[in-house]
């Protein structure tokens, strides 16, 4: 009778250890076993770190405001100016760091309203059904039929272009995706035993929705938020690129790309560096979202 090899013994031991782990430990094991998840988490944390400590990290904090240095205008990337300078001599690297503050502020503002509102409507539609479901979901379908960029352009064109109005424009349609996600999850959970037990015990509608059903939606909501953050940054940059977002001299990544594109291809760094900064942030949130989705084993 053949003896098991060392590799087979290690595999069996690893399998036994995995079986003894709790669900939370297993989720963390899946997350850290995925290299892209770790990379995404590192990128997101670095963006947050840069945004929070921008005044301390930026080589030229004054470049974030109304600052000019015509002697160094259009300077290419170098050891003095890592990302080069723009058309008035401002340090692009410093403006990118401060631009992350604007981007993260947009994410917090949009998702801070869209997520609770969308989740609440999804809970109502999935739990009560009948006419409540019909009204909420048909209204959601109507809003989803409107092109998001067209709606945002219309709103920001009527209102004055600034960060607050950009948040309003994006939030007007962003809640719909969360409503449909939570509605789908709640409808699938309504026939589960724990919901029936809560009804039989006389629990209120509020208790069943927010104490029984909502906790089972947290994983999907967390993954959706991570994925949405990157798209919100991209959407905000698109509005700013078209001149309907944050206005100069406030450093905004989309505005910097728009301004820098006027000097292509000679001064390529003025558009490329802010564009790469946008790509860096979006890539981080997408990798993190995919990692969380695999960790929590949910579909969004």
Image (spheres, rainbow, N blue to C red):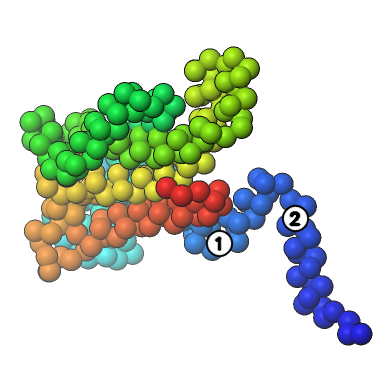
Q: Position of residue 236 (x, y in %)?
A: 23, 44
- Where disc 1 sits, the SS reads loop
Residue 202 image-quadrant placement: top right
Q: Where does label 2 land, which residue? A: 19
- Residue 228's disc number: none
Q: CA distance from mark 2 to mark 1?
A: 19 Å
Question: Can residue 57 be seen by looking at this rendering?
Answer: no
Compare residues 234 and 7 and report the one nearer the observer.
7
For mark 2, does the 10 Å Cα neighbourhood hold few (<14), some (14 to 19), or many (20 or more) residues? few
Q: Looking at the image, is 151 positioned above or below residue 50?
A: above
Can the viewer see residue 79? yes
Of callouts 2 and 1, the N-terminal one: 2
Which residue carries the number 1 mark?
A: 34
Asked if residue 23 lies left or right of residue 281, the reply is right
> Would residue 58 be found to the left or right of residue 203 on screen?
left
Residue 125: where, in percent of width, then height? 37, 28
Residue 212 figure quarter: top right
Name the secondary structure under disc 2: helix
Relative to the observer, which residue lies in front, 220 or 45? 220
Q: Is residue 254 above or below residue 248?
A: below
Whether the residues at callouts 2 and 1 have beta carbons within 8 Å, the answer is: no
Q: Quadrant of residue 192?
A: top right
- Residue pushed farthest right? 1
Q: Residue furthest bottom?
A: 2
Q: Residue at x 29, y 66 (%)?
A: 78
Q: Position of residue 62 (x, y in %)?
A: 26, 42
Residue at 85% from the left image edge and 79% from the top image edge: 4
The residue at 63%/17% (across/down) is 201
Residue 151 placement, left or right of 42: left
Q: Nearer the viewer, mark 2 or mark 1?
A: 2
Residue located 35% across and 31% down the image? 118
- 276 up-or-down from 155: above or below: below
């Amino acid at each position: 009778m053949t003896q098991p090899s060392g590799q087979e013994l290690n595999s069996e031991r690893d399998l036994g250890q995995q079986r003894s782990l709790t669900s939370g430990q297993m989720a963390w094991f899946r997350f850290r076993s995925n290299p892209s998840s770790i990379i995404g988490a590192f990128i997101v944390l670095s963006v947050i770190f840069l945004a929070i400590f921008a005044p301390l990290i930026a080589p030229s904090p004054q470049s974030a405001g109304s600052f000019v240095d015509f002697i160094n205008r259009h300077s290419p990337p170098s050891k003095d100016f890592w990302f080069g300078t723009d058309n008035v001599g401002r340090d692009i690297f410093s403006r990118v760091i401060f631009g992350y503050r604007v981007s993260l502020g947009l994410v917090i503002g949009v998702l801070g309203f869209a997520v609770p509102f969308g989740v609440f409507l999804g809970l109502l539609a999935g739990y009560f059904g009948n006419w409540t479901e019909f009204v909420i979901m048909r209204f959601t379908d109507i809003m989803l039929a409107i092109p998001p960029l067209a709606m945002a352009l219309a709103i920001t064109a009527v209102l004055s272009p600034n960060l607050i109005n950009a948040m309003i424009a994006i939030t007007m349609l962003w809640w719909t995706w969360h409503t449909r996600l939570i509605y789908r999850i709640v409808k699938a959970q309504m026939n589960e035993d724990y919901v029936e037990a809560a009804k039989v015990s006389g629990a209120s509608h509020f208790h069943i929705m927010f104490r029984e059903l909502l906790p089972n939606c947290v994983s999907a909501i967390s993954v959706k938020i991570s994925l949405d953050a990157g798209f919100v940054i991209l959407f905000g940059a698109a509005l700013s690129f078209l001149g309907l977002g944050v206005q100069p001299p406030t450093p905004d990544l989309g505005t910097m790309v728009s301004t820098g594109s006027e000097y292509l291809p000679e001064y390529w760094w003025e558009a490329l560096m802010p564009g790469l900064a946008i790509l860096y942030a979006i890539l981080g949130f997408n990798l993190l979202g995919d990692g969380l989705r695999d960790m929590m084993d949910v579909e969004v």
